Image: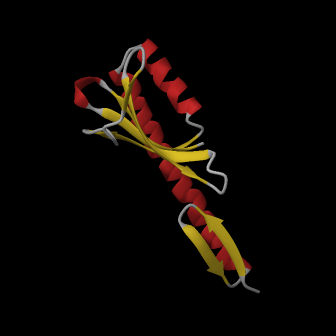
Amino acid sequence: MVRNILYSSGLIIMSDEDDERELMEEYMKEEADRAQQEAKVLAEVKGMVSEGYWMDIEEEIRESDRTAGFIITDKPCTDDVEQRDLFKIYISQHAVGESGDSWEGDISIELPNGKYLTFGYEM
């Protein structure tokens, strides 16, 4: 029996349940590794900023809905900038979906020393 499974790397076609189990284990490991790496990045950012600054960053992340790919960069994701209370935020986005009322893109939040917390999001 041929089965399909969809995960972040794309559509995989499998031929039996053993293949499905192996692919799911691989996927779960990749997701755990990704989450661990992102937690390290966020911990590093938290150590770079004040408590109030961190709380505002957390709020931006929460408001961004589904997020992924947290990295620290030397440049923002775009030149389009908005000023927040404590920092500048750069948002590169485009509409997705049939109705065009969903958004995805990248966000960069200004950090000290010319660095940026950059991540992808979907809303």
What colour scheme does the image use? secondary structure
Front residue of this view, candidates 88 and 24:
88
Vertical placement of residue 20 versus 114, above or below: below
* In the image: residue 31, left or right of residue 117: right
* In the image: residue 12, left or right of residue 83: right
Residue at coordinates 26% horizontally, 39% vertically from top-left? 75
Q: In which quarter of the image is the C terminus?
A: top right
Q: Quadrant of residue 108?
A: top left
Q: In which quarter of the image is the N terminus?
A: bottom right
* In the image: residue 44, left or right of residue 5: left
Q: In which quarter of the image is residue 25?
A: bottom right
Looking at the picture, how far across and down is residue 98, in whole percent?
A: 66, 57
Residue at coordinates 58% horizontally, 30% vertically from top-left? 63
Query: For the view shown, which residue lies furthest in the front direction?
Result: 99
Looking at the picture, how far across and down is residue 69, in whole percent?
A: 45, 47
Residue at coordinates 63% horizontally, 55% vertically from top-left? 97
